Image (spheres, rainbow, N blue to C red):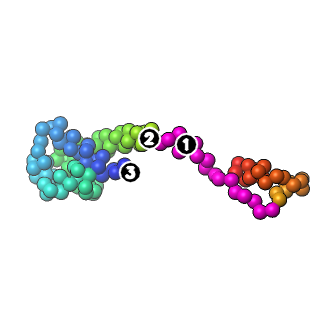
Amino acid sequence: MILLRRLLGDVLRRQRQRQGRTLREVSAAARVSLGYLSEVERGQKEASSELLSAICDALDVRMSEVMREVSDELSLAELAAMATLSEGDLLRPVLEPVPLPGPAVDRSGTTVPKAAAMDVVAA
């Protein structure tokens, strides 16, 4: 399962590290505890929109830029997850044939073999 909080934390950490700043510096500027910011960066805590705004302000980066980077990473993670599915998972029928009770009758009143009737129901 892809965790959004983990992707967001990774992006925030990279932004901070690109600037060569410490957790202590950013937590002080954002007015959030060092421990809580650390947990957000490690994807252990969900950041509220207010907290995310404060962290982005402290990093002097637009929230939309952070969210765009998270969105890009989410897309890549989804593609990677899809690549791990087996061909059988992708080709599994959406509808399973449903056995009909008794003989099936088409619109003209002709009895239809059960196998043919199940194909019609599944389609």
Q: Is residue 89 visible?
A: yes
Residue designated by label 1: 88
Q: Position of residue 103 (x, y in %)?
A: 83, 59
- Relative to the observer, which residue lies in front, 102 or 48? 102
Segment tinted magenta in the rendering: 85-102
- Relative to the observer, which residue lies in front, 86 or 105? 86
Q: Residue at x 61, y 47 (%)?
A: 93
Q: Is residue 39 left or right of residue 113?
A: left
Q: Residue at x 28, y 43 (%)?
A: 66
Amino acid type of the residue tagged 1 in the rendering: Gly
Q: What's the distance in space between the residues labelled 2 and 3, CA to CA? A: 13 Å
Amino acid type of the residue tagged 3 in the rendering: Met
Residue designated by label 3: 1
Helix, strand or loop under label 3: loop
Residue designated by label 2: 84
* Farthest-out residue, right: 109
Q: Residue at x 78, y 54 (%)?
A: 114
Q: Position of residue 80 (x, y in %)?
A: 40, 39
Nearer to us: label 2 or label 3: 2
Q: Is residue 102 left or right of residue 122?
A: right
Q: What's the distance in space between the residues labelled 1 and 3, CA to CA? A: 20 Å
Q: In the rendered structure, which disc, 2 or 3, sits on the residue that comes first in sequence? A: 3
